[in-house]
Image (tube, grey):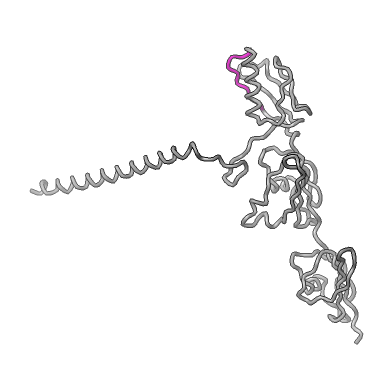
Amino acid sequence: MTNSRRHPLRSTVRAVAACSLAAVLASTAFAQSTTRAAAPGAQPAPVGSVSGSTAEYRLGSGDAIKISVFQNPDMTLETRVSEAGTISFPLLGLVRIGGLTVSDAEAKIADGLKKGNYVKQPQVTILIVKVTGNQASVLGQVNQPGRYPLEVADTRLTDLLANARGVSVAGGDLLVLSGSRGGKPFRMEIDLPTLFGPNGREQDVIVQNGDVLWVDRYPMIYIYGEVQKPGQIRLERGMTLLQGLAAGGGLTLRGTERGIRVQRKTDGKVQELKPAMDETLKDGDVIFVRESLF
């Protein structure tokens, strides 16, 4: 009697488990079919996008490369891409590979060997020994200015700045990237702190061959007269007159707030101003603190 009563419960549990398993399998199959159906129409992520896709390097003039053909060691060649973007390959003569990706260049050489009946199924491999064809320059206030190779196709502005060992102590927040895009002059000003903000990826543009990155000096103000530490002071972002005076050590016992003047150059002319203590200073401002008459 006990066993006969348990059998219906077991059957019910098994039925429920079978239904659950079938539902899971059906859901998985639906998800896979949806993915396959969406794949043909899906657009590939753009080169250098946030998804992390990486563009392939394009060969440039001056690049040192090593070309190998599988099971044909006599065709191994170490050479440089000429200024015209060509190389001289055995049996094929001059082959133009400048501007091609590595895989496209491999396919072009393999196609030439196959069409000439030199190798039936050629497998060509190109190894980049040294990158010199694609370079960008970093100038201005950086720790190591110079020309740097663009070893990957999606080298970004921050990568180039890192190669130059970052901004020096005399460097400011203004970066200027210049070059050409689509045969037209290109110039872009970048505020360095925004590169690390919420939308910094949009400002961290991809660097191209021939680009020049300029890092400007930091802005300066000058203070003299009745202050503790006269001289030049780095103008911090949003610095007010009061903060500028504090950076100069404050007024001496003979200084007076009523005698504070700011000389500012505007449109080529120097104007003498009497700003409020909370007014923001500008690059090149000269602060003069007069001596109290009483």
Q: Residue furthest left?
A: 1
What residue lies at 80% left-to-right and 47% top-to-bottom? 139
Please state the horizontal and vertical placement of residue 149, each as a whole percent of the image: 74, 38
In the image, residue 209 sits, relative to residue 118, either above or below, namely below
Give x and y (percent) for residue 14: 22, 44
- At a point 67% along the width and 28% down the height, the residue shown is 127
In the picture, residue 238 is in which quadrant? bottom right
Q: Residue furthest bottom?
A: 294
- Quadrant of the frame with the C terminus: bottom right
**Does residue 42 sit above or below 232 in this rendering?**
above
Asked which quadrant contains residue 263, the reply is: bottom right
Residue situated furthest right in the rendering: 293
Whether 124 is among the magenta residues is yes
Quadrant in which residue 260 is drawn: bottom right
**In this picture, residue 37 sits left or right of residue 121:** left
Residue 4 position, x and y percent, is: 10, 46
Q: Is residue 2 left or right of residue 180?
A: left
Which residue lies at the image location 81% right of the left edge and 75% below the top edge?
A: 275
Q: Name the foreground residue: 78 vs 264.
A: 264
Up-down: is 280 above or below 65?
A: below
The overriding secondary structure of the stretch rendered in magenta is loop
Residue 170 belongs to the span the image colors magenta: no
Residue 173 placement, left or right of 114? right
Q: Which residues are magenta?
A: 118-126
Q: Residue 167 in the image: state x and y as whole percent.
A: 76, 53
Report the label total: 0
Q: Where 61 falls versus 156 (above or below)?
A: above
